[in-house]
Amino acid sequence: MYKKIISMIVVLTFTIGLVGCATIPEEHRGAATGAGIGAVAGATAGALLGSSGAKTEMAVLGGLLGALAGGLIGHYAYDKKKSEKETAEKYNYQSSQGAMVRIENAEAVPKTVSQGKTVDMKMTYALLGMGGERNVTETREIRYKGELYGKPQVTVTRGEGTFLSTIPITLPSDAPKGKYEIIMTVQASNVSDSKGTSFYVE
């Protein structure tokens, strides 16, 4: 993997129940905003740096709602963990099985966080049988006491293999305390998989 430093614009739509997606080529560089994006709410835009061993993409769509609206959604980063061959060997995959999307792990780091601090929403997933590069949409639904409080979403171009992706959220200083549920979903080639995790605000 290589270090890549690129600018990213965080774009948030605040239309409840309607979250757009941005399609971003894997090797695209520079800053980008989606066309026709609605009102910006609950975050700021800025330039961010890629970390060593990870790549960064450009746009994250979907806002933080209600009591989390004062928080920030940070940059989206990903790293390819296994090649197509390594992933296929792990799952004993045969091409006759067709497209496969498998979330291996979904976690919030740290599991317990203070108000005003940052939580990384991490997801490791495998893609096989796509027949080349495809658009892949990642969605993370954040719920508190059953109510939707955020839905950041990004659409990227992926080949086949195993990937780790991260979206951080910085909570507002008055974020309600308690347990937050996150449902993470990956969709590609009309196939999807979902996995849940949680974190606590103390």
Image (spheres, rainbow, N blue to C red):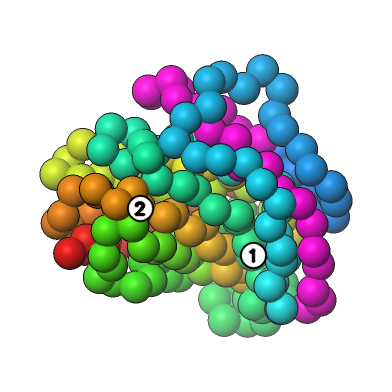
- Return the x and y of residue 111 as percentages of the image width and height: 28, 71
User: Which residue occupies 71% across, 51% down?
Assistant: 47
Residue 129 horizontal side relative to residue 123, left or right: right
Badge nearest the viewer, 1 or 2: 2
Image quadrant containing the C terminus: bottom left
User: Which residue occupies 80% across, 64% down?
Assistant: 5
- Return the x and y of residue 33 as percentages of the image width and height: 72, 33
Residue at mark 2? 171
Q: Residue furthest front?
A: 173
Residue 79 horizontal side relative to residue 121, left or right: right
User: Which residue occupies 53% across, 33% down?
Assistant: 12
- Return the x and y of residue 132 as percentages of the image width and height: 79, 54
The image quadrant that residue 117 belongs to is: bottom left
Q: Is residue 13 above or below residue 114?
A: above
Q: Amino acid at mark 1?
A: Tyr
Q: Earlier in the sequence, mark 1 or mark 2?
A: 1
Q: Amino acid at mark 2?
A: Leu
Q: Is residue 53 above or below residue 167?
A: below
- The answer for how far apart the CA atoms under marks 1 and 2 are is 22 Å
Q: Is there any visible trace of residue 187 in the rendered image?
A: no
Q: Is residue 136 above or below residue 126?
A: above
The image quadrant that residue 158 belongs to is: bottom right
- Return the x and y of residue 173 as percentages of the image width and height: 29, 52
Q: Residues within 10 Å of mark 2 (few under 14, many from 20)?
A: many
Q: Is there any visible trace of residue 177 in the rendered image?
A: yes
Closer-to-camera residue (53/133): 53
- Report if residue 64 lies within the magenta region: no
- Dominant secondary structure (helix, strand or loop) of the stretch shown in magenta: loop
**For residue 78, which numbered disc appears in the image?**
1
Bounds of the magenta segment: 1-22
Residue 39 horizontal side relative to residue 34, left or right: left
